[in-house]
Image (cartoon, grey):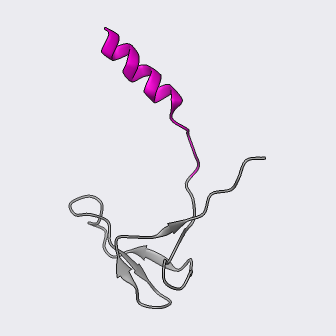
Amino acid sequence: MKLLKRIREVFGMLKHREPTKIYCPLCGSPKIRLSSSLDYWLTPKKYVCENCGYVGPIVMEIEKEEG
């Protein structure tokens, strides 16, 4: 039961956040999308930038600061 209580505490501490906007890590363009509809379901995510042609698993996310 201690394990279940600890798991509950960890989930309670997780910050719920709204989806953030993603940007290309090379050019900073917001015109970036998953390369196919199967990404993240069967295979790791792979993004494609429509602006510069970047293809890869890394994107930038910008979160709004609370204050």
Against 60, residue 40 (above or below) is above
Towards the viewer: 6 or 30: 6
Pick the front one: 60 or 41: 60
Q: Main secondary structure of the magenta part?
A: helix
Q: Which residues are magenta?
A: 1-18
Q: Quadrant of residue 49?
A: bottom left
Is 34 left, or right, of 23 in this rendering?
Answer: left
Q: Which quarter of the picture shows residue 40?
A: bottom left
Tell me which residue sits at (43%, 74%) in the image: 33
In the image: residue 9, left or right of residue 55: right
Q: Quadrant of residue 34?
A: bottom left
Point out residue 50 in the picture as x, y percentages from the top left corner. 46, 87
- Vertical side of 52 occupied by 65: above or below: above
Q: Is residue 48 above or below residue 37?
A: below
> Which residue ends up furthest to the right in the rendered image?
67
- In the image, taking residue 2 as reference, residue 10 lies left or right, namely right
Report x, y in % for residue 14.
50, 35
Q: Position of residue 38 (x, y in %)?
A: 26, 66
- Residue that lies at the very extreme toward the top in this rendered image: 1
Answer whether residue 14 is magenta in the image: yes
Quadrant in which the N terminus appears: top left
Where residue 61 sits in the image (x, y, percent)?
54, 64
Q: Residue at x 42, y 21 (%)?
A: 8
Number of on-image labels: 0
Specify whether residue 35 is painted magenta: no
Q: Depth check: 60 or 20 in front?
A: 60
